[in-house]
Image: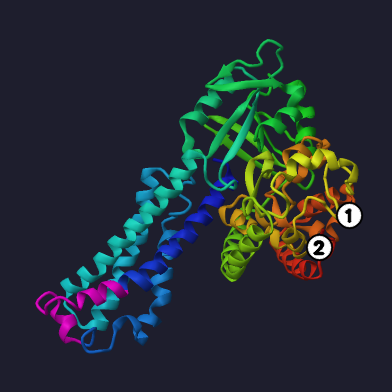
Amino acid sequence: MFKDQKAYLQFLNITSDLICLLTVYWLIIPFFLKLAGLFPSSFFPGIISGPGIISGNNFCWNGCYLKLFPVFIFTPFLFMLMFRGYRKTGVLDTRTILYQTGVICTAYIPVLFLSFYFSLGITFKEGLALAAIPSCFLWIILVLNRLHISFFIKKGCSNANIIRHILIIGTGKNAVSTAEHIKNHPEYGLRITGFLTDKDDETGKSIVNKKILGKIDEIIRIIHDHYTDCVLCPDYDECAGYHEFLVNTCSIIGLDFAASKFTPPVDVIKNKYVSSESIGNLQLKLVKFVYRNPWQSFLKRIFDFIISCVLICLCMPFWIVIPIAIKLTSPGPVLFRQKRIGKYGKKFTLYKFRSMIDNAETLQEKLMSLNEMDGPAFKIKNDPRQTITGRILRKTSLDELPQLFNVFKGDISMVGPRPAIEKEVSLYRPWERKRLSVIQGITCFWQVSGRNTIKFDEWMKLDLMYIDTWDIALDFKIFLKTIPAVLLKKGAY
């Protein structure tokens, strides 16, 4: 697991731990104390007869409990900081899970005990019991949460900021041993896309159940066909003659490049992120030509998740009215599903409200002469395939509302280059493929600068400018600028 993967995983653990602590504090403890008040007085005589639940002065909602809120929440994180719980390792193995959850719950028990003991006027044993039971619930929740994260990392289904898909250069001894190590440790979040070779007779063969996909000089074509975000040269001597070519290619496309015994050339990596990494016993230098700070990447995902949830709820009337309008004005499904190309070429299904007749895609070839966009993109101002409802949806951009569910799932972001179809991506020039080096989005510079009135080359340059100047503040600015752009229907058709 590379350093940026570990950092992202740490932020994910911290945030999920905070959610678990809030759940226990606001839900489980009040429910448990309310339940305790239903038992006979012989179970907890101090609670029943003291200034607690039965007296009508509910402990959970009085000033004492609320004042203790910061102590309940931040003491476990203080213990984790003291015992370096989050820095122990980036991999969620069984030992790490037990260690981290044990530290948090060990900090939680004495805080609960002291608050119950002094506030409810109960005995030592009663206070210990009341503290231990919610802490056990907290431990179970924390363990289940970490097992959930670990499961999706091992299955390769988790967020793209954790999983890395590696294209290995070479087929020698170091390449094989590195591939075996990656295969035997899926919890590291590394996956093998395949191998490239410099020999004519090796293409199509398999190493560690992964195919040799082609020759090294075919890397651009192979990257187009196979989801890859990192190129790895485990043996410097085997691919020494290709280093300059590979570095330049990764720089143009925006892929990560890692190699052993490698000193990155200054002219290529100026202002780029370089780190020392390891895969088993193999020591590497990793160059990230498109670097995203893990903390800002995590904030971006949190922003996407919250905004998509809020907008999905706020748009509830549209989820009812628009499907009815689509059904009344044209036959066919309500949703239009289309395969799009996401980050580093990963395919996903994009959702939109259907704005055209049901067989619109099959008619596109006949309408190519009417295309008003240059380059691979296809746009027609008065597209004859649009339905009556579809014209309104397109003008108001309401056809794109279902993409909020793509954002919720993590397929795309609220802000990022628009995801293209595979046919368009296949016609990209190498420098244009760099727009695939970040997560794609609903809105970006193109949407707020005129959309369909902008020529294709300018569109690509705007996306590359976004990639090269990105920070979380830029996403907020573009998101806010999108609101008037949509309301004024700027460049929409």
Q: Earlier in the sequence, mark 2 or mark 1?
A: 2
Most foreground residue, 327 or 26? 327
Which three-letter amino acid code belongs to the residue tagged 1? Ile
SS type, badge 2: helix
Q: Identify whether 172 is placed above or below 17.
A: above
Q: Position of residue 83 (x, y in %)?
A: 41, 56
SS type, badge 1: loop
Q: Which residues are magenta?
A: 30-50
Query: Is residue 236 toward the left or the right of residue 386 in the image?
Result: left
Q: Position of residue 34 (x, y in %)?
A: 25, 77
Residue, disc 1: 454
Residue at left offset 61%, top offset 63%: 324
Which three-letter amino acid code belongs to the residue tagged 2? Val
Gap between marks 2 and 1 measured at Cα: 11 Å
Residue 306 in view, yes or no: yes
Query: Is residue 344 toward the left or the right of residue 135 in the image?
Result: right
Residue, disc 2: 448
